[in-house]
Amino acid sequence: MLFAVEATRRWAGDGITVNALMPGGIRTNLQRYVSEADLERLRRAAAGDGTGPALRWKSPEQGAATSVLLAASPLLAGVGGRYFEDCNQAEVGMLSARNGVAAHALDPEAAARLWDLSVTTLAG
């Protein structure tokens, strides 16, 4: 997420914006060798501490919807440095096991430090 914040700051003047997203739990052919019982256990475990709702599997089309929205919607032209889930911008600070975004994940100073550290590490 911090990468999206700093990349947008650096490149927005060139018309480039970057966002992050969570597509959700998607039921695809990748799970063809996983038993239904194991998939059910995974679905329930995704509720975290057990107090939240169990994961609802998405179809590939539903899982792609947020990516398509961010890539193609004129409503999001110029919008960057944000985190999206289920075709909406995630709520800041309203975290659960599967939803929301932490405020520190959007911190511009932390994003700049991470960017610089990454460049230094890759160069060295």
Image: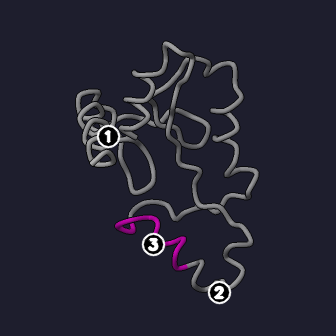
Q: Are marks 1 and 3 in contact (CB under 8 Å)?
A: no
Eyeballing the image, is 25 above or below 69?
Answer: below
| Disc on the earlier residue, 1 or 3 | 3
The N terminus sits in image quarter = top left
Image coords of residue 76 (percent x, y): 61, 22
Residue 109: which quarter of the image? top left
Image coords of residue 42 (percent x, y): 52, 75
Secondary structure of the residue carrying numbered label 1? helix
What residue is pinned by disc 1?
119
Residue 35: mark in rendering: 2
Q: CA distance from mark 2 to mark 3?
A: 15 Å
Eyeballing the image, is 96 above or below 79?
Answer: below
Residue 114: which quarter of the image? top left
What residue is pinned by disc 3?
45
The kind of residue on which mark 2 rests is: Ser
Is 46 one of the magenta-colored residues?
Answer: yes
Q: Magenta segment range? A: 41-50
The answer to whether 97 appears left or right of 56 in the picture is left
Q: Residues within 10 Å of mark 1 (few under 14, many from 20)?
A: few
Q: Are marks 2 and 3 in contact (CB under 8 Å)?
A: no
